[in-house]
Image (spheres, rainbow, N blue to C red):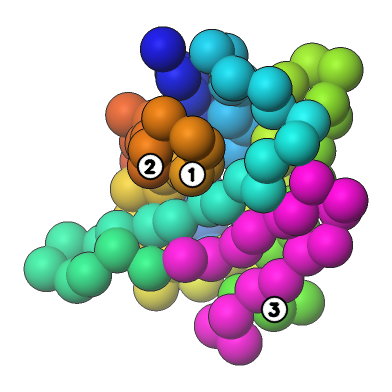
Amino acid sequence: QVQLVESGGGLVQPGGSLRLSCTASGFSFSIYAMNWYRQAPRKERELVAFITAGGITNYPDSVKGRFTISRDNAKKTVYLQMDRLKPEDTAVYYCNVNTFRGNSWGQGTQVTVSS
């Protein structure tokens, strides 16, 4: 079955950086778009980045210029580089893919931005 395993979260000071990783299995990784979402306490889950199979990326204004999504098809891994982090970036970050098996999510990784 589809499995997505995130890693790389943690506690970072405002202005700092983190790189999240999501390693996939159970599907043909290279042919699917991959997404990163986040969910802060008492807020809805929101899309923060996606990358198509061909490498086209897109971001909402809230993270544009600070977050960068990339993928390594050989490693079946998608990354989220987060720079100039702000306290409002604090959330659980989830990896997501929509395949022929349906919509799949990782378990999430906590990112806390605080001094």
The CA span between labels 3 and 2 is 25 Å
Q: Are marks 2 and 1 in contact (CB under 8 Å)?
A: yes
Quarter in which the C terminus is drawn: bottom left
Q: Nearer the viewer, mark 3 or mark 2?
A: 2
With 23 as the anchor, is 11 left or right in this view? left
Quadrant (top left, top right, bottom left, bottom right) of the N terminus: top left
Crowd band around label 3 with a 10 angstrom C-alpha radius: few (<14), some (14–19), many (20+) = few
Residue at the location (53% across, 66% down)? 48
Asked which secondary structure carries label 2, the reply is: strand
User: Disc 1 residue type?
Assistant: Asn
Vertically, is 57 above or below 104? below
Answer with mark 2 or mark 1, whichever residue precedes in sequence.
Answer: 1
In the image, is residue 99 above or below residue 26? below
Contact flag, marks 3 and 2 (Cβ < 8 Å) = no
Residue 109 can be seen, yes or no: no
Q: Nearer the viewer, residue 24 or 90?
A: 24
> Which residue matches tag 3?
64
Question: Quadrant of the rendered structure where residue 110 is?
Answer: top left
State the extent of the magenta-drawn residues as a range.
47-62
Write down the quadrant of residue 39 in the picture.
bottom left
Q: Give the spatial CA distance, label 3 vs label 1.
A: 23 Å
**CA separation in Å, label 2 and label 1:** 4 Å
Q: Which residue is denoted by mark 1 in the rendering?
A: 98
Question: What residue sits 19% from the left and 71% below the top?
Answer: 43
Where is residue 82? Give x, y as percent: 66, 56
User: Label 3's element?
Assistant: loop
Residue at which label 2 appears: 103
- How many other residues sit within 10 Å of disc 2, few (<14), some (14-19) or many (≥20)? few
Question: Residue 44 placed where, x, y %?
Answer: 22, 70
Which amino acid, mark 3?
A: Lys
